[in-house]
């Protein structure tokens, strides 16, 4: 059975009536045009250029990765709203939990020291699992610190502000440590990063009429945590989605932990039907080779959608062109649908694109090459959607190509 992300129109504008959101056009800004203009001449470039003056609508093919994390502090209200304005039809809250077992949106249970201003709060910073220890220039030892959501109650968590993810490992002061934003990102929109609970994010997404793909993150603490089991954790995520009024058809719960996915399939089958297995076998298992057998095994366990990193889905043909990978073809043969992650997370692509593009590095020489990658993912691989740190890029492509995914 194919799981179709139904395209819907509209995005964010400053209006008060919920019913109006779907009627507003997407605001994509200059970046998609910049990317298209930087492409090599080709029929694909001509086609994408022909859409530059068109009206753009929300697309479920465009998935906001942590919101719009390229320029907004990830998993903040501001980041989510930016993604909605750029036409993302599906939004992600990475879900972890606090000391009092409340679900919150963070990429990791142990990243508060790089994604928030927790170190600027002395009374909270001293509660971190590893309080800040300055770097030692004489020995070359890097600064040490680890602050977990489980170090703090929800009330304490809500005192924090999100910042751009980054840190200076050579810092000898907290102030220096917090100034680590990569040069290709910006702090321009990082002045008021509003942290959110999972329930708050679900309510926001519901208000704006977008679909949801929350990810249940692995715990840094031993589970069960103060009586809070992995199963209770997985169920609480579902319960909060139900409380927000999300239909299973508008929900794509995801996890790297196959047992979480199997739990949803068994215990909440209406949500398990579209549960997404984030496939890390391609980089966690040194000798992993995709086969029809191991893809079919996933499907036999009830998995219908898998989501690997970009590089697993593409390879180069004998002419050096980007094409669908053997992994992608085998997944399709096993009747598995595919979601890809993550576009716009690699910075400038003149260096070959880094980790996400490792399987096609020789073909990646300029920023515009990501549009070629996106075209292959859409047409040759046939993905349901693409996560992006800047959803406008995917929204532009989806509208131009009239994708109904």
Image (cartoon, rainbow, N blue to C red):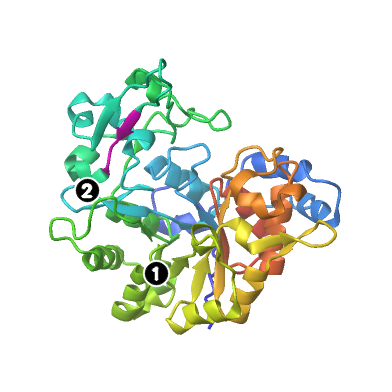
Q: Does the magenta segment cover residue 47?
A: no
- What residue is rendered at 48% in x and 78% in y? 298
Residue 101 lies left or right of residue 280; in this view the side is left
- What residue is rendered at 56% in x and 49% in y? 391
Q: Secondary structure at mark 2?
A: loop
Residue 185, x across and y down, in percent:
54, 33
Mark number displayed over residue 378: none
Which residue range is magenta in the image?
Answer: 144-148
Residue 176, x across and y down, in percent:
39, 19
Depth check, front residue: 122 or 4? 122
| Residue on which the image places disc 2 | 98
Q: Give the quarter of the figure containing the C terminus.
A: bottom right
Residue 400 lies left or right of residue 77; in this view the side is right
The residue mark sitting in front, 1 or 2, is 1
Residue 345, x across and y down, in percent:
56, 44
| Residue 203 visible to the viewer | yes
Majority SS type along the magenta span: strand
Give the class, few, some or many, for how many residues have Cα within 10 Å of label 1's Cα (few <14, many ≥20).
some
| Residue 10 visible to the viewer | no
- How far is the residue under mark 1 from the one under mark 2? 23 Å
| Residue on which the image places disc 1 | 258
Residue 131 lies left or right of residue 183; in this view the side is left
Give the class, few, some or many, for how many residues have Cα within 10 Å of label 2's Cα (few <14, many ≥20).
many
Q: Secondary structure at mark 1?
A: helix
In the rendered image, the residue lying farthest to the front is 139
Depth check, front residue: 187 or 110? 110
């Amino acid at each position: 059975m194919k799981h179709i992300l139904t395209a819907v129109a509209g995005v964010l504008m400053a209006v008060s009536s919920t019913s109006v959101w779907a009627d507003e056009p997407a605001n994509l800004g200059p970046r998609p045009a910049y990317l298209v203009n930087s492409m090599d001449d080709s029929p694909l470039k001509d086609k994408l250029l022909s859409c530059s003056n068109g009206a753009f609508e929300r697309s479920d093919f465009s998935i906001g990765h942590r919101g719009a994390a390229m320029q907004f502090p990830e998993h903040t209200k501001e980041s989510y709203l930016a993604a909605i304005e750029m036409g993302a039809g599906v939004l992600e809250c990475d879900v972890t939990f606090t000391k009092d077992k409340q679900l919150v949106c963070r990429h990791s249970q142990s990243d508060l020291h790089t994604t928030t201003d927790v170190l600027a709060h002395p009374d909270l910073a001293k509660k971190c699992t590893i309080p800040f220890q300055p770097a030692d220039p004489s020995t070359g030892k890097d600064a040490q610190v680890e602050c977990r959501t489980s170090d703090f109650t929800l009330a304490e968590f809500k005192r924090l502000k999100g910042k751009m993810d980054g840190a200076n490992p050579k810092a000898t002061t907290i102030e220096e440590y917090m100034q680590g934003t990569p040069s290709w990102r910006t702090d321009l929109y990082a002045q008021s990063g509003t942290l959110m609970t999972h329930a708050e994010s679900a309510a926001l997404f519901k208000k704006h009429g977008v679909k949801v793909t929350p990810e249940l993150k692995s715990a840094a603490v031993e589970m069960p945590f103060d009586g809070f089991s992995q199963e209770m954790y997985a169920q609480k995520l579902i319960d909060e989605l139900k409380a927000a009024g999300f239909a299973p058809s508008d929900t794509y719960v995801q996890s790297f932990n196959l047992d979480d996915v199997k739990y949803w399939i068994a215990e909440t089958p209406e949500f398990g039907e579209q549960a997404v297995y984030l496939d890390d076998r391609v980089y966690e298992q040194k000798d992993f080779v995709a086969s029809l057998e191991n893809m079919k095994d996933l499907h036999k366990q009830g998995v219908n959608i898998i989501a690997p990193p970009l590089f697993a889905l593409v390879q180069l043909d004998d002419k050096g062109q980007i094409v669908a990978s053997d992994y992608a073809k085998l997944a399709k043969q096993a009747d598995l649908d595919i979601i890809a992650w993550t576009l716009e997370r690699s910075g400038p692509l003149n260096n070959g694109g880094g980790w996400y593009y490792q399987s096609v590095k020789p073909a990646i020489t300029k920023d515009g090459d990501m549009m070629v990658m996106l075209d292959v993912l859409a047409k040759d691989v046939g993905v349901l959607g693409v996560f992006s740190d800047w959803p406008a890029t995917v929204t532009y492509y989806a509208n131009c190509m009239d994708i109904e995914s």
